[in-house]
Amino acid sequence: MDKEFEEMCMKKRTKEIEPSVIEITNPLQIANLAKSTSILSAYFLSGAKHMLHSNSPLLSILMAYFAMEHKTYEILALNGLKVTSHVCAIKGLSRVIERRDLAETLSRAYENRLEVNYLGNMKTVDLDRNRAKNFIENIAIPFIKEIDKVISKIS
């Protein structure tokens, strides 16, 4: 076995990880971060809708999840937080925004993303398309609209 591969990949290691949340106080930075994450959310949602009509419709679930995650980053940015991890995004919705319901929805969406990303669990294109369409229409879009409602109250 290759020694470098064994050391890096097969042995326990301690890794120092930078914080996943950084406080930002500069109003311009807050506005720019909120705007860019909002644009990314719309971009991923557009991609999710487009992928529904492809032969790979489950990719729509991944894209729709990222639309939800970026929308979460937007609302957290408006609260002075730059978040770079899905776990902290979920915790932020629950603890900072105080919307446990939205945090639970994002958490379940994350589980869907992991299932598609790592397990595949593909059926037929038509069944996968229906599953993805349901995810977009009944989970992602209502979630994004609800975040937008909360944002409109704080803006």
Image: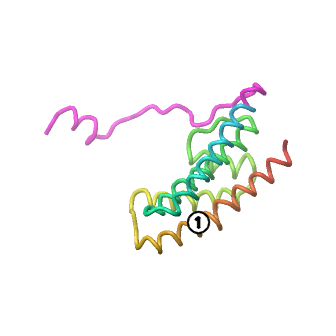
Say which residue appears at 63% left-offset and 52% top-offset: 68
Whether the magenta-drawn stretch holds residue 5 is answered as yes
Label 1 sits on residue: 135
Residue 138 appears in which quarter of the rendering?
bottom right
Q: Is residue 80 above or below residue 143?
A: above
Say which residue appears at 57% left-offset and 50% top-offset: 66
Secondary structure of residue under mark 1: helix
Q: Quadrant of the C terminus?
A: top right
Give the image location of residue 139, x and y in percent. Answer: 64, 64
Q: Amino acid at mark 1?
A: Phe
Give the image location of residue 123, x and y in percent. Answer: 40, 73
Give the image location of residue 36, x and y in percent. Answer: 66, 36
Q: Residues within 10 Å of mark 1 (few under 14, many from 20)?
A: some
Q: Would you say 85 lies left or right of 124 here?
A: right
Q: Is residue 28 above or below residue 119?
A: above
> Is residue 22 visible from the viewing direction of this image?
yes
Q: Nearer the viewer, residue 30 or 101?
A: 30
Q: Nearer the viewer, residue 3 or 57?
A: 57
Figure colour scheme: rainbow
Q: For the magenta stretch, what is the residue range?
A: 1-30
Whether the magenta-drawn stretch holds residue 19 is answered as yes
Q: Residue furthest left?
A: 1
Residue 115 appears in which quarter of the rendering?
bottom left
